[in-house]
Image (spheres, coloured by chain):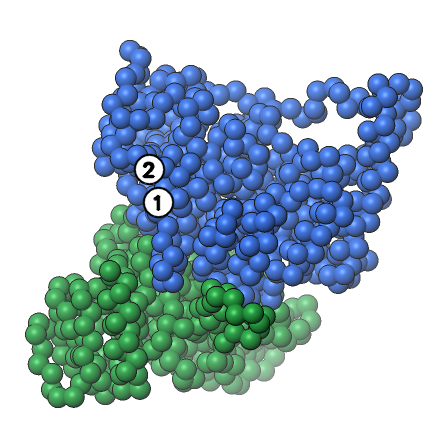
Chain colours: A blue, B green
């Protein structure tokens, strides 16, 4: 049946308290440290050497009988017969596979947490079609049991997005998948913000009887007006900053801050969009306002315009097999990811949008490999692993820090019991910044959220 | 290399299309029966029925031969409890027929207790969902209805284009999914069910009636002959369902059954089969705080018959049952039990095992050939026979794919077939 996020009929609170006190005589300075900063600290670790594994680097390479050395939270070396410092913990990985930590660019963990009840429905600020002012991190509940399940599936980094009820849903947050009491302590340090926008049926369904938009043309008018409104704001601030921030600062506005950030290129653009024709409209929108789209999410029809997406340097974050739950998802095919990938310069990503799917992104990728064989498109494991590691890292603009086993990068690493592209694949160990934070064979290294403590129904 | 062989094989099948006779040679036959898996085995089909299973079977004459070259052959898969044929686009109400919605006012009682609602009457065998499921190796499903407490009847459908259910199946929905229509209390759900069963057994005064006369007749009949398929997750609710079943002398199967592992011994003793989604491992509501990926393995170990269904996207992604069964195996269920859970076990639970669900002599020849382990997502269906008739693995999805894979011919894609 339906798998769309719950749209809570929230009491209309459009006229809520202004988020900004207009008479503030000490206007915020853009140069000051970003608010709500990450407090993430890597957990202390000893050097670890995974020995004699099949290694998929995430950069397209496969190394057989190879070692991976992690030291000081970083990938120190990948290769054969590596030497290790004296205090190194040695892990015999014979017969096992090693990959970079899995990255999901589309998750609602924490904002639509388990249990999925009214009280945890925090993913859509469905009170206005443009809520560029809201930040997903202010909804994330770190006690969502889904984080630990995703970790057991090898997920080390994930982008939490607002839902798709709104034309502009708000800012995303990128998290390291570490258990913590606060969201700030999970926040990927230095990662850029993202914005979530949505095409098509969802906004018009949610707002059709709440003042609009009620049509796709209404949707596009809504994006355009929002960006037009932000253009003047951006100029005021750019002029003020260029002039050495002398005199009275322009008034600050949360919505326009985010949209100006998009136009400046500081915020990566994630657009929920199913149909080929609508993606093309959104590409024109991006040209009208001078921003680059990072990723189309869901893109069930991305295969129809795979070359255009590649030419525009836009990734497709897609499902292996979802289709038909809405008309705009009716043309889904099992080879969508394959066709986006094989376009010259194509950037394919397997995403989840699901607390179940995020636990098994490796299996979702395996389905794509299997379906593609039917039409003589062959993908090697070393290529396919990119769909869930380096390509999402690139889309999120954190590929200089994670997403591959390149020396110097964060030691976000998964040790699998065999090839990851199988139903029977299991992440045996998951390392985040070099720390072993999940071990399938050791209950003491399996996080459990507070919500599940004392629940007698639990195993 | 393998692909080349398959292509030849499919060609051979195509030439036999329309026939109900085939001799499949050299398959790895996973019978989903007591015989287990058989290497280098032949299956002879005549008149759409499996006539013989063995090594080096003689061709009785003029039966087209298909060489499986060692690939796995399974019974056609069970697609779960679905709305395939009752739902085209989930979000479009005008394309959905699975649930009764009379909009009868606040109490909703009239539509809460309508056992006579027969969803199979709306079944559309031309829905695109059938072919998509067949491409995934699925040959039959249990058509479901889930909109109310006593939700009505679905039925077991073979996905061969016919519209007659093999048999009808009554549904009951317990727990938070139908609270709104049944007194806003789980206690009210059991109260109403108890009263309805009582009413179906013996007439009650007019002002105490909950059911229509048709409802009383249908429910009375079902209580004698059919197994009620009950959606229920919470341990406490499962216990009450079992008590209700004993009190009223009805047979039940459980669906969802997220916390069934906690009462595995009772389910085994009462011979209650369960349909579970082994990917449903999160405490996604307060009815399933005990959800675990080990549910299937724990139940099977206790002697409970385990079948699988897709609880998340049952119809459009019915093909996911394979992955669901495979993940149960990855979490401790024996492989043969995993296969049985999407072939013979649901057929038995639904009372159609006399005809389908296993590769045994006398059964309808609904068969699927696989590129590899059918429980692994790295395999796909390579061929299908429905009642012995070669059935192309073509759907709207494969046709769209081929349209966009075809080389540019100077005309818009709308001109490509």
Q: Quadrant of residue A102?
A: top left
| Structural crowding at the residue carrying mark 2, measured as other residues with C-alpha within 10 Å and reported as few (<14), some (14–19) or many (≥20) | some
The residue to which callout 2 is attached is: A62
Report whether A314 appears left or right of A244. Answer: left
Q: Chain of mark 1?
A: A
Task: Kindly identify the residue that appears in the image at 18 percent across and 66 percent down.
Answer: B69
* x 29%, y 69%: residue: B7
Instruction: Report which quarter residue B158 is drawn in.
Output: bottom left
Where is residue A353 drawn, in percent x and y?
54, 48
Classify A269 as above or below A77.
Answer: below
Asked whether the viewer can see residue A206, the reply is no
Residue A253 in the image, given as x and y percentages of width and height? 82, 34
Work out which residue is located at the far top of the displayed protein and give it: A86
Residues at badges 2 and 1 in contact (C-beta under 8 Å)?
yes
Task: Kindly state the secondary structure of the residue where label 1 is placed.
Answer: helix
Residue under the point 23% across and 37% down: A95
Q: Is tag 2's residue or tag 1's residue first in the polypeptide sequence? A: 2
- One can see residue A222 in this view: yes
Q: Secondary structure at mark 2?
A: strand
Task: Tell me if residue B158 comes above or below residue B408 in the rendering.
Answer: below
The CA distance from mark 2 to mark 1 is 8 Å
Depth check: give the residue in front, A90 or B94.
A90
In percent of width and height, residue A305 lies at 57, 58
Residue at horizontal 28 percent and vertical 30 percent from the top: A66
* B63 horizontally vs B313: left or right: left
Q: Position of residue A393 (x, y in %)?
A: 52, 36
For residue B248, which numbered disc appears in the image?
none
Quickly name the residue at label 1: A381
């Amino acid at each position: 049946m339906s798998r769309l996020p719950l749209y809570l009929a929230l009491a209309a609170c459009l006229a809520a308290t202004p988020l900004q006190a207009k008479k503030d005589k000490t206007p915020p300075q853009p140069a000051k440290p970003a608010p709500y900063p990450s407090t993430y600290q890597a957990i202390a670790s000893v050097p670890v050497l995974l020995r004699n594994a099949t290694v998929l680097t995430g950069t397209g390479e496969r190394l057989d009988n190879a070692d991976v050395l992690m030291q000081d939270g970083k990938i120190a070396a990948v290769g054969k017969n590596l030497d290790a410092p004296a205090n190194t913990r040695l892990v015999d990985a014979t017969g096992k596979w090693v990959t970079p930590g899995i990255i999901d660019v589309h998750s609602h963990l924490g904002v639509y947490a388990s249990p999925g009840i009214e009280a945890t429905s925090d993913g859509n600020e469905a009170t206005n079609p443009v809520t560029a002012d809201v930040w997903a991190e202010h909804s994330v509940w770190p006690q969502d049991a889904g984080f630990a399940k995703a970790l057991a599936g090898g997920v080390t980094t994930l982008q939490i997005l607002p839902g798709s009820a709104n034309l502009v849903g708000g800012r995303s947050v990128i998290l390291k998948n570490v258990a913590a009491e606060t969201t700030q302590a999970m926040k990927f340090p230095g990662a850029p913000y993202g914005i979530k926008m949505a095409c098509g049926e969802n906004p018009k369904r949610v707002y059709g009887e709440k003042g609009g938009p009620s049509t796709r043309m209404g949707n596009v008018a809504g994006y355009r007006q929002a960006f037009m409104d932000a253009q003047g704001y951006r100029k005021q601030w750019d002029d003020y900053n260029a002039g050495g921030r002398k005199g009275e600062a322009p008034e600050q506005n949360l919505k326009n801050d985010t949209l100006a950030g998009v136009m400046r290129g500081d915020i990566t653009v994630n657009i929920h969009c199913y149909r080929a024709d609508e993606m093309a409209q959104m590409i024109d929108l991006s040209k009208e306002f001078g921003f680059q789209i990072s990723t189309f999410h869901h893109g069930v029809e991305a295969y129809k315009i795979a070359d255009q997406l590649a030419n525009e340097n836009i990734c497709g974050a897609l499902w292996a097999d979802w289709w038909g739950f809405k008309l705009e998802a009716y043309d889904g095919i099992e080879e969508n990811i394959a066709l986006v990938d094989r376009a010259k310069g194509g950037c394919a990503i397997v995403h989840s949008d699901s607390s179940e799917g995020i636990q098994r992104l490796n299996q979702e990728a395996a389905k794509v490999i299997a379906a593609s064989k039917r039409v003589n498109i062959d993908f090697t494991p070393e290529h396919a692993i990119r769909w869930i590691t380096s390509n999402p890292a690139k889309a999120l603009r954190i590929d200089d820090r994670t997403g591959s086993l390149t020396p110097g990068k964060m030691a976000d690493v998964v040790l699998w019991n065999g090839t990851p592209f199988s139903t029977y694949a299991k992440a045996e160990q998951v390392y985040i910044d070099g720390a072993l934070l999940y071990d399938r064979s050791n209950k003491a290294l399996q996080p459990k959220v507070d919500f599940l403590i004392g629940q007698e129904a639990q195993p | 290399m393998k692909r080349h062989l398959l292509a030849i094989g499919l060609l051979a099948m195509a030439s036999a299309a329309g026939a109900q006779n085939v001799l499949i040679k050299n398959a790895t036959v996973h019978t989903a029966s007591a015989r287990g898996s058989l290497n280098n085995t032949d299956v002879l089909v005549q008149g759409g029925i499996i006539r013989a299973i063995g090594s080096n079977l003689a061709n009785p004459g003029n039966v087209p031969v298909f060489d499986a070259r060692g690939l796995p052959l399974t019974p056609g898969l069970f697609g779960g409890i679905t709305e395939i044929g009752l739902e085209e686009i989930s979000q479009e109400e005008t394309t959905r027929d699975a649930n009764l919605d009379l909009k009868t006012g606040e109490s909703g009682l009239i539509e809460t207790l309508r056992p006579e609602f027969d969803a199979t009457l709306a079944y559309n065998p031309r829905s695109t969902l059938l072919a998509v499921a067949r491409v995934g190796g699925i040959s039959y499903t249990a058509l479901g209805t889930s909109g109310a407490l006593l939700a009505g009847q679905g039925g077991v459908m073979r996905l061969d284009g016919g519209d007659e259910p093999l048999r009808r199946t009554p549904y009951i929905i317990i727990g938070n999914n139908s609270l709104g229509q049944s007194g806003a209390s789980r206690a009210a759900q059991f109260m109403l069910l108890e009263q309805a069963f009582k009413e179906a057994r013996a007439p009650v005064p007019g002002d105490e009636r909950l059911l229509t006369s048709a409802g009383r007749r249908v429910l009375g009949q079902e209580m004698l002959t059919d197994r009620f398929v009950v959606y229920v997750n919470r341990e406490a609710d499962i216990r009450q369902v079992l008590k209700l079943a004993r009190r009223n002398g009805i047979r039940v199967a459980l669906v969802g059954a997220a916390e069934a592992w906690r009462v595995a011994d009772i389910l085994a003793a009462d011979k209650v089969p369960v349909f579970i989604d082994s990917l449903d491992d999160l405490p996604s509501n307060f009815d399933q705080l005990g959800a675990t990926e080990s549910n299937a393995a724990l139940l099977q170990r206790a002697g409970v018959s385990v079948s699988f269904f897709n609880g998340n996207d049952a119809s459009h992604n019915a093909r996911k049952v394979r992955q669901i069964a495979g993940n149960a195996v990855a979490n401790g269920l024996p492989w043969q039990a995993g296969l049985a859970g999407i072939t013979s076990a649901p057929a038995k639970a639904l009372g159609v095992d006399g005809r389908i669900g296993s590769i045994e002599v006398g059964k309808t020849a609904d068969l699927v050939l696989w590129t590899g382990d059918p429980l692994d997502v790295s395999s796909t269906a390579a061929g299908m026979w429905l009642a012995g008739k070669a059935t192309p693995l073509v759907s709207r999805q494969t046709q769209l794919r081929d349209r966009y894979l075809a080389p540019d011919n100077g005309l818009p894609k709308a001109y490509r077939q």
